[in-house]
Amino acid sequence: MTPRFSADSVLFDLDGTLWDAGEGTAEAYNETAASMGLSRRFTAEDLHGVMGLQAQEILDRFVPQLDRQAQKRFSQAVSAAECEILRTGRGSTLFPGVRGLLETLRGRGLRLFIVSNCQAGYIEAFLEAYGLASLIEGFEHPGRTGLDKGGNIALVVRTYGLRAPVYVGDAAVDEAGARKAGVPFIRAAYGFGAPGSWDASIDAPQDLPALLAPLA
């Protein structure tokens, strides 16, 4: 594979790109639904279908019968349960090759970041569960900033003074965010989503290093 991008940094989506947390997230949703007397039950496939969406979009799809105040309580309870479950490694799977990929990129001097549409504590749970905090320089999410994915990508680029970043994700929202931020988008074709276009595509995490050349 011929290198296509001169890069100094890689920004990653999380769900569908670095891991699958569908089972753990479904467990958190089901615990919360039961505690609030809701009959709806959730599966990992349900969660895969909404990964990457903003929190309010997910609530409107999953619990439209609740008013905004009740949706907020539901969301807060799900978030707390989810992070508690996932930080132990339960209910999640690190995609094959991801750890080696991150180590390879860091070994080449690339700076690594995560930008995900998630709540506070979720990225931290991922890093804790798989012992990856030393490989990730920083991260951002709407739970902290209130920004959409494009805004958070742009924020990371500005905050860390990145000169030539690329963004890797699996979904249409990832493509839209990268385009908005003016960053090349690399599709993780092994993920859950279906973006409309991309600047390059990888079939497995270990394919990424071949696309990247050191920034001169």
Image: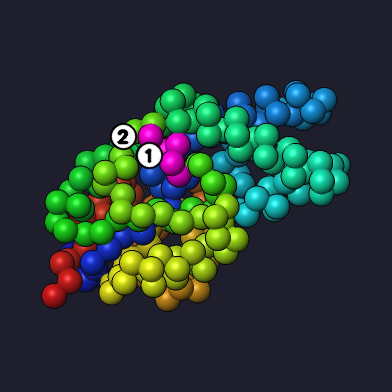
Pick the quarter of the image with the C terminus: bottom left
Element marked by disc 1: helix
Q: Amino acid at mark 2?
A: Gly
Q: Is residue 211 shown to the viewer in this render?
A: no
Q: Residue 98, position in %: x, y?
A: 30, 42
Q: Residue 142, position in %: x, y?
A: 56, 57
In depth, the one of 172 and 1 nearer the eye is 172
Q: Residue 189, position in %: x, y?
A: 40, 51
The residue that mark 1 highlights is 127
For the residues marked 2 and 1, what is the alpha-carbon distance in whole angstroms? 6 Å
Asked if disc 2 and disc 1 are in contact, CB closer than 8 Å, the reply is: yes
Horizontal side of residue 98 vs 76, given as left or right: left
Q: Amino acid at mark 1?
A: Leu
Q: Residue 103, position in %: x, y?
A: 20, 45
Q: Which residues are magenta?
A: 123-128
In depth, the one of 216 and 212 nearer the eye is 216
115 is higher (above) or lower (below) than 179: above
The residue that mark 2 highlights is 131
Element marked by disc 2: loop
14 is higher (above) or lower (below) than 94: below
